[in-house]
Image (cartoon, helix red, strand yellow):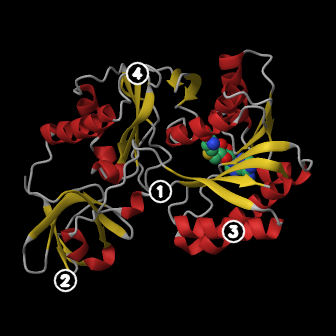
Amino acid sequence: MTCKKIILRRGKEESLLRRHPWVFSGAIERGDEGIVEGDVVDVFTREGDFIARGHSQVGSIAVRALTFEQETLDQEWWNGRLASAFALRRALGLTDGTHTDTYRLVHGEGDRLPGLVVDIYGATAVVQCHSVGMYLSRSEITAAIRALPGLRVEAVFDKSSQTLPHKADLGASDSCLWGVSGGEGEVRENGHRFVVDWKRGQKTGFFVDQRENRRLVGSYAAGRRTLNTFSYTGGFSVYALGGGAVSVDSVDSSQRAVDLAARNVTLNFGPEAPHRAMAEDAFDFLSRSQQDSYDMIILDPPAFAKHHKVLGSAMQGYKRLNVAALRKIAPGGILFTFSCSQAVSRELFRTTLFSAAAIAGRRVRILHQLTQPADHPIDIYHPEGEYLKGLALYVE
Ligand code: SAH
């Protein structure tokens, strides 16, 4: 396999030697003529030693390394990477499909496949490419998914139109790469049923990363009047009702999301379940809700800080939101609060909750420190893979 070459500036191979998979554009001395985004390129030190092979990109990350070996990235290679990802999920007990048939099969750098996400929804695998290189490899990826012994999928669906780099006009159309899929389907998670709309829904259709945290919410729900803000399609709401919440209000700014939340509640508990689904801004809803009307509140907003540059204003947003919830929650209430911004560290998030508690004037204790589940693994050499953090707080 001969690839175009990129030569690093002297000494710039340090992080790659530690198997961090990103080459920043500032580390590059020169590259071969004619490299286009998505090409597989070889990265060499200034001294001429091979160091990594990966996908070229336009932007501050210029190469995402797929391997640190001089190996051919043929179908067998893709099959091996997918098989290794599947072996991990099997070890986690996620692949037998008994109580749960939705999980993340590939989590980008965490599975040594930078730029690729694959989520399993029952018999459909949803592929989401975040780089041109991955998108150009979609046939190999599809073949590798189909070749997995033990994984029974009937369709591979591409959901990359919103996640590919801005100018990459690759004609991604959010449709099947193989098989037939109606665009939505029913899945099971810890025994609960959910309709997932992978064609029109957000991300790949469902936030599988909250599976374990949803279960914890369910375990605290008995007898609690529950508010689930940023509810999306009602993941936390269904678990809260399953755990015996006396009532659940789901609030999300997306009408489509709350419609599906209502449908998911009905699917599990029938039309009489004590549930209200409201399409409204969560900040507005909290500011107009009565004090002490909820004994459990969930705050799971989208990433407020997409980049470090906007961290300051993002933290103001998290603080304002948490102050509002801490002011409203009844004494003895439990607040589940999350941030999925990679740029927000665990420490910073906790400090922000400290400020919010002080402003709201409540006594607050930390019950649980929450994170992403094991099917969203973090490569020890790529700490940036850690993104989801949460706190379960007891509020007096
Ligand atoms: N907790 C959900 C996932 C939340 S994703 C689950 O377990 O499935 C974040 C959600 O916040 C999205 O559904 C988005 O529509 C919603 N959202 C974004 N901004 C909002 C706002 N200002 N008020 C209410 N919802 C908002």
Q: CA distance from mark 2 to mark 1?
A: 32 Å
Answer with the quarter of the image where residue 74 lies: top left
Q: CA distance from mark 4 to mark 3?
A: 40 Å
- Between 348 and 46, the one lying in front of the other is 348
How many other residues sit within 10 Å of disc 1, few (<14), some (14-19) or many (≥20)? few
From the viewer's perspective, tell me whether residue 140 is left or right of residue 312.
Answer: left
Q: Is residue 329 above or below residue 148?
A: below
State which tag comes first along the sequence, 2 or 1: 2
Q: Nearer the viewer, mark 2 or mark 1?
A: 2
Residue 105 at what x, y percent from top left? 36, 37
* Quarter in which the C terminus is drawn: bottom right
Mark 1 vs 3: CB contact within 8 A:
no
Mark 2 vs 3: CB contact within 8 A:
no
In the drawing, what numbered circle is on residue 11?
2
Identify the amino acid type marked 1.
His
State which tag comes first along the sequence, 4 or 2: 2
Q: Is residue 11 above or below residue 255?
A: below
Cβ of mark 1 under 8 Å from ligand 1: the answer is no
The residue lying at 64 percent from left, 34 percent from top is 218
State which tag comes first along the sequence, 1 or 4: 4
Question: Dot 3 lies on which element?
Answer: helix
Identify the amino acid type marked 2.
Gly
State which tag comes first along the sequence, 1 or 3: 1
Q: Which residue is mark 1?
A: 166
Q: Nearer the viewer, mark 2 or mark 3?
A: 3
Q: Which residue is mark 3?
A: 354
The residue lying at 77 percent from left, 16 percent from top is 271
